[in-house]
């Protein structure tokens, strides 16, 4: 593969403001990963991305180093950062680990959390449906994680929430050459959130387990 460190940058501009520049750049890069603008296997330089975002290379490099810690990119000395390519097997393994972690927690919550508490999470489920309706994969990815974070947060274990969030984020990165996520797939995925809330509120243990496992296997993006 030829070096695309300077030539290849995300096709769509994502301008950032200078307040909390590093955080803004990190959010923009994460969105570009989910949307496929930062393509698996491609190499990107800090200066080229900085020019694209209208900032210096320093916050870009800092944000990319965070993405390297998250397993999204690898650092290439004197070249930039390569977006790591994953396989279907890796995605399947992520789904399995997420199920092992979250299914027991949700089953326990279904037995112990009052229906009126679940009703308070309906706006979070509705937010995923609204994001899905726009067909915006990065916006949906954020809303999707927020919904799962709200559900797991009821367990009162912040370590659990943080680990689950990291696994969830990794599961949202597309495979190499994958087509753009269809709006219909996002809408279907969001609908599962509403169904899950209803099952949790009703204490339908078997339904909760089935929905969560299926949700992880077919999650979009």
Image: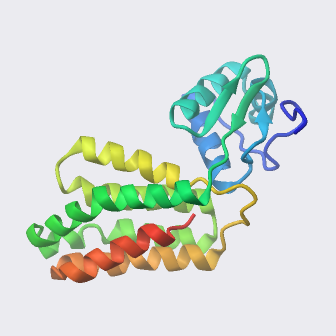
From what the image shows, is residue 81 above or below residue 214?
above
From what the image shows, is residue 136 above or below residue 171?
below
Tell me which residue sits at (29%, 55%) in the image: 101
- Dividing the image into 4 quarters, which one contains the N terminus? top right
Viewer-closest of 124 and 111: 111
Tell me which residue sits at (72%, 26%) in the image: 55
Give the image quarter of residue 181: bottom right
- Residue 11 in sight here: yes
Give the image quarter of residue 201: bottom left
- Residue 19 in sight here: no
- Dividing the image into 4 quarters, which one contains the C terminus? bottom right
Q: Position of residue 156 (x, y in %)?
A: 17, 49
Viewer-closest of 172 and 198: 172
Give the image quarter of residue 64: top right
Tell me which residue sits at (66%, 37%) in the image: 16
Q: Report whether 53 appears left or right of 7.
A: left
Q: Position of residue 207 (x, y in %)?
A: 26, 82
Viewer-closest of 171 and 161: 171
From what the image shows, is residue 21 above or below residue 139?
above
Q: Report whether 152 appears left or right of 171.
A: left
Viewer-closest of 173 and 116: 173
Q: Position of residue 125 (x, y in %)?
A: 38, 70
Tell me which residue sits at (9%, 67%) in the image: 112
């Amino acid at each position: 593969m030829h070096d695309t460190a300077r030539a290849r940058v995300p096709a769509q501009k994502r301008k950032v403001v200078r307040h909390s520049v590093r955080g803004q750049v990190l959010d923009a890069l994460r969105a570009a990963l989910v949307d496929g603008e930062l393509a698996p296997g491609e190499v990107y330089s800090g200066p080229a991305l900085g020019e694209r975002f209208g900032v210096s290379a320093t916050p870009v490099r800092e944000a990319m180093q965070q993405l390297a810690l998250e397993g999204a990119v690898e650092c290439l000395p004197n070249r930039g950062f390569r977006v790591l390519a994953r396989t279907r097997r890796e995605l399947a393994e992520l789904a399995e680990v997420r199920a092992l972690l979250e299914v027991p927690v949700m089953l326990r919550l279904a037995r112990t959390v009052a229906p009126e508490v679940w009703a308070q999470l309906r706006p979070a489920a509705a937010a995923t449906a609204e994001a899905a309706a726009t067909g915006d994969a990065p916006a949906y990815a954020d809303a999707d994680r927020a919904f799962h974070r709200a559900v797991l947060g009821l367990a009162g274990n912040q370590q659990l929430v943080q680990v689950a969030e990291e696994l969830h984020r990794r599961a949202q990165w597309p495979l190499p050459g994958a087509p753009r996520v269809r709006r219909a797939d996002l809408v279907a995925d969001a609908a599962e959130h509403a169904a899950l809330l209803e099952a949790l509120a009703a204490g339908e243990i078997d339904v909760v387990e089935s929905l969560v496992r299926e949700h992880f296997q077919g999650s979009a993006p």
